[in-house]
Amino acid sequence: MHRLLTTALLGLAATLSSLPAGAQGFAAYISPPRFELQPVPGETLRQVVEIQHVGREKGNYRVYTNDWVFNADNSVTFSDALAADSCRPWVAIERRELTIEPGARYRYRFEITPPPGTAPRECRFALMVEGLETAKVEGQLNFPVGGRIGVIVYAAIGNAAPLLELTATRVATINGQPTALIDVRNSGNAHGRVEGFVNGIDANGQRLELAPADLPILPGETRALSLAPVVQEGRPVPTIRFPLQVEGALEWGTNRLPLNTRFAP
């Protein structure tokens, strides 16, 4: 359930500042990088995120919640301001600041309590863990260093669920390379992900196994997902020569998305 989104998510998203030589900076591993929960209206659902401090000195951290937006370029924008449909008022966190000894792990608790009678919907927020460190450079004053990580939380209330459909297939240039893309629309009221593998043959007769990018598709949006070759660790990524013929089916939940198409620039 808890797979890494993209780097960005950070987790789905981590924002790190520039550090001077010798500064400890942000020194934490956080697990899991995201939660996918099913709270019941009127009941409190408690969860734990583990923060491991790997710095050589004590680590000081601030913890808080944010709303967030997943942008069209797959970046994430966090906001302290409450969004119009924010469910952060339903969320309680254990404490706002903590100190962790070098090498120690801290099990940090948070909980979510949807009000009684809450209609089916997906609640989304980020649990932000921010380093509170200072560094001193010779001849200068102390200044803050560090960074933050956003742990993404999805909470499906009632029968909230995605409804995904393939709307288009195309080729676009990404990082200077032609890339096969599928456009997937979500008409449901919870986020969804497309998974699975399909088979491809490129213009040189090269046979490939392809998988879609592991990105969330939020309710009401259409997101472009790249199809990339699946390669064993340590092996080079093959170059695809278009046109590319793809056959098979991808999946979301127990549903299938047939994909039998020719990708040509």
Image (spheres, rainbow, N blue to C red):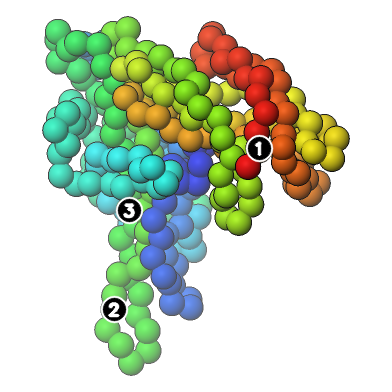
Q: Give the residue number, with chain letter if any, for mark 1.
A: 264
**41 and 192: which one is in front?**
192
Amino acid carrying label 2: it is Asn
Residue at 79% across / 31% down in the picture?
201
Residue found 18% across the figure and 31% down from its top: 86
Comes first in the chain, label 3 or label 2: 3
Task: Using the rendered view, name the quadrant where residue 95 is placed.
Answer: top left
Give, as a three-letter code, the residue at label 3: Glu
Q: Secondary structure at mark 2?
A: strand
> For numbered disc 3, what is the local secondary structure?
strand
Report x, y in % for residue 242: 72, 41
Q: What amino acid type should be assigned to the residue bearing mark 1?
A: Ala
- Tag 1 or tag 3, which sits nearer the N-term? 3
Residue at image coords 51%, 42%: 6
Q: Quadrant of the C terminus?
A: top right
Residue denoted by label 3: 130
Vertical placement of residue 20 versus 215, above or below: below
| Residue 38 seen in this snapshot | no
Looking at the picture, how far across and down is residue 93, in whole percent? 24, 35
Q: Marks 3/2: CA distance? A: 18 Å
Rounded to the nearest angstrom, the CA distance separating label 3 from label 1 is 45 Å
Q: State if disc 1 and disc 3 touch (CB < 8 Å).
A: no
Q: Residues within 10 Å of mark 1 (few under 14, many from 20)?
A: some
Where is mark 2, residue-wise? 142
Q: Nearer the viewer, mark 2 or mark 1?
A: 1
Q: Which secondary structure, mark 1?
A: loop
Q: Is residue 155 left or right of residue 217?
A: left
Query: In the image, which is nearer the foreground, mark 3 or mark 1?
Result: 1
For residue 65, which quarter of the picture? top left
